[in-house]
Image (tube, helix red, strand yellow):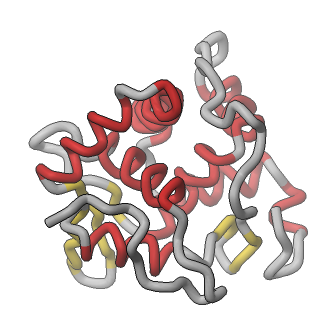
Amino acid sequence: MPLDLEATAAPPAGQPPSADAQARLLLLIDAFSETKSSKGIEGRMKLAKLDFLLRYPAHFKQLLSMRRPGKEAGEDPWLTGAIEQSMIRYRYGPWDPSYYSLLGALTGKGLIEPKHDDAVATYRTTEVGHDLSLALAETESWRAVRDRARLLRQHFNLSGTTLKDLIYKTFPDIVEADWGTKL
């Protein structure tokens, strides 16, 4: 099976999920799947909150300095300072409507394997997905993203609800934003 990150189903907005967005999520999921004992990322809420912290470096740095004073945040993963698509305020905080198509594309390519226990979906990289993640992390463009994803695993491996509460407590502007507002 080719590892073409370009060929995917269209997200709700009618735009295909970008290769960059797929790579970012793959690196994030892989950081939480690296050990045999790791379950991966449990729940879309947790995935969305971790992705929010990955995509918005200033918010990540603020939360990291609160949780681990003096801990170095490392290089920002977005050298241009741009995010290809802003997240929106949704029911449980930051959300990206393209998650369904992104996760579907990664699953369809055999890069991640979702498991559904009760009402919670857990996302973990496959062996092929892990190998691709390692190859991406060796490139200059993706190394900082991989490093930031590992910091997220190390310091923010919390439940989705706990991450949501932490984000709401720290960033009241997100809580006060109307649903559908770009963040």
In screen coordinates, is 122 left or right of 101?
Answer: left
| Residue at position x 53%, y 51% in the image | 50
Residue at the (43%, 52%) spot, across then down: 23
Q: Is residue 166 above or below residue 6?
A: above
Quadrant of residue 79 within the rendered picture: top right
**Which residue is at 57% across, 57% downward?**
49
On-image quarter of the N terminus: bottom left
Which residue is outermost to the top? 70
How many numbered circles does the render carry?
0
Left or right, 120 with respect to 91, comes to: left
Locate residue 75, reporting x and y percent.
Answer: 62, 21
Q: Between residues 81 and 59, which one lies in front from this camera angle?
A: 81
Q: Position of residue 64 (x, y in %)?
A: 63, 29
- Residue 178, compared with residue 66, is above or below; it is below
Viewer-side residue, 14 vs 41 = 14
Residue at 37% in and 31% down: 137
In the image, residue 132 sits, relative to residue 77, either above or below, namely: below
Relative to 59, 117 lies left or right:
left
The C terminus appears in which quarter of the rendering?
A: bottom right
Q: Position of residue 86 (x, y in %)?
A: 75, 62
